[in-house]
Image (spheres, coloured by chain):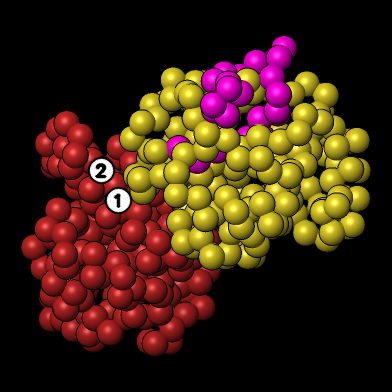
Chain colours: A red, B yellow
Amino acid sequence: MKTIFLFDLDSTVTKEEILPTIANKVGKGAEMRELTEKTMMGDLPFQESFRSRVATLSDSSVKNVSDMISEIETSPAIVDFLKNHENSYIVTSNLDVWIEKLMKKIGMENRYFCSKATVKNDKIVDIEHILSKDSVRDKFSNRAKIVAVGDGSNDFDMLRKADIGISYGGVRKIAPSLIDISDYSVYNDNKLCELLNNIEKEEAQSE
Amino acid sequence: MGTRLGAGKPKALIDINGKPLIAHTLELLKDVDDVRIVVGYQAEKVIDAVNQYRNDVIFVYNHNYQQNGTGASVSLAKKYSKKFFLTIDGDILIHPNDMKKILKSEEEFIGVCEPSTDDPVLVDIDKNGLVTGFSRKHGKYEWTGVTMLESNKVSSTDGHVFHLIEPLLPLKYKLIREKEIDTPNDYKNAIIWVTNGYK
């Protein structure tokens, strides 16, 4: 059985939280922290929260933000896994115009799903479409085995819909809502990749 | 879950001389590369405790732990692993020297001990020294909840671990010293055992 791997980007592939890191660099750290906390407390639904967090950075040059995001530290083990597995994809609600450069850098330019933004004069003017992570599963054959890896509460549906849901706690604490629907939790990126390789091997042998 | 113990926490987390029970086992497994722990009851508490000792454990969820048995947990844990797997129940302490012996094993075995608990699962040994069956009524030794099996010979079950083992009998056994903690009395004895250097 063919296996497809879906990875969350933020605090899974990356070793830092993307938006807070960028916000700190452009002097919007406090604003971003407040929004993030509100979201974690459940006071702000995801889509609204995401739009607000993007708005916090909308004064900044898209090119600058994109450059900064491309410099973000990533997990060597996970990037290596992505490079060596054509059947792996990144699934993120982050914006295309911000993450394109990073995706190219890690060799994923044709293998990611994300949200879409409209840009004018190097500034974000609109979010055209916010990706709903669970919709990605439907882009693949019913016959494929889907393995999803994530850490945040917005990975809930993606993990729940997957055949194997793995919550990853190597960077941030795993969102409590993921615990009830996870098949595995792993806190070390090397171990995660070992498990993924073992899954692929065993699934390939079974039909 | 440790209902008979009345501890209000998973047995894996009860304190034995300043460390949770599971930490004692983890220390004996420190040179083992691939360690999986099946969690269900108070999963996050168990995970937090384990992560204090090593961060490379794979946690496997048995969300139906209230309805199914230890065999279901083992069925889940052994997926995507190597040729052999060693399974150790979460409520036992193993003598360190016997753990060393176990970890050197290159073949399947059933871990047994001298009968000592109130309601043991016993094993029958045949004249060739092989385990031929489990029983609550007769058997020379007690089953320990420690077993090494070949992964792809084992199917799955919702019942006990010995339901997984039965189709594979007869198998060799290894005699080990251990303490199982089911009752407040077991708990007291386990602490004394560890304090006295496992004598």
Identify the element where label 1 is drawn: helix
Q: Residue furthest top?
A: B137
- Residue occupying image coordinates x 21% and y 64%: A82
Classify B18 as above or below A141.
Answer: below
* Figure quadrant of residue A56: bottom left
Residue A92 x %, y %: 27, 59
Residues rendered magenta in the picture? B125-149
Residue for point 23% across, 48% down: A200
Quadrant containing the C terminus of chain A is top left
Q: Which residue is farthest front?
A: B127
Instruction: Give yes or no for residue B146 being in the magenta stretch.
Output: yes
Of all chains, the one bearing label 2 is A
At label 2, the amino acid type is: Glu
Given the image, what chain letter belongs to the residue carrying mark 1? A
Q: Front-most of A44 and A198?
A: A198
Which residue extends farthest left?
A110
Q: Report the residue at 23% width, 40% height from top.
A: A203
**Image position of A33 (left or right of A97):** right
User: Which label is found at residue A198?
Assistant: 1
Residue at mark 2 to residue at mark 1: CA–CA distance: 6 Å
Q: Nearer the viewer, residue A37 or A15?
A: A15
Q: How many marks?
A: 2
The structure residue drawn at horizontal position 60% and vertical position 54%, both measured from the top left corner, is B101
Query: In the structure shown, which secondary structural element does the residue marked by tag 2 occupy?
Result: helix
Asked where in the image residue B7 lies, by quadrant, the reply is: top right
Query: Is residue A42 found left or right of B80 in the rendered image?
Result: right
Q: Residue tagged by mark 2?
A: A202
Answer yes or no: do the residues labelled 2 and 1 have beta carbons within 8 Å? Answer: yes
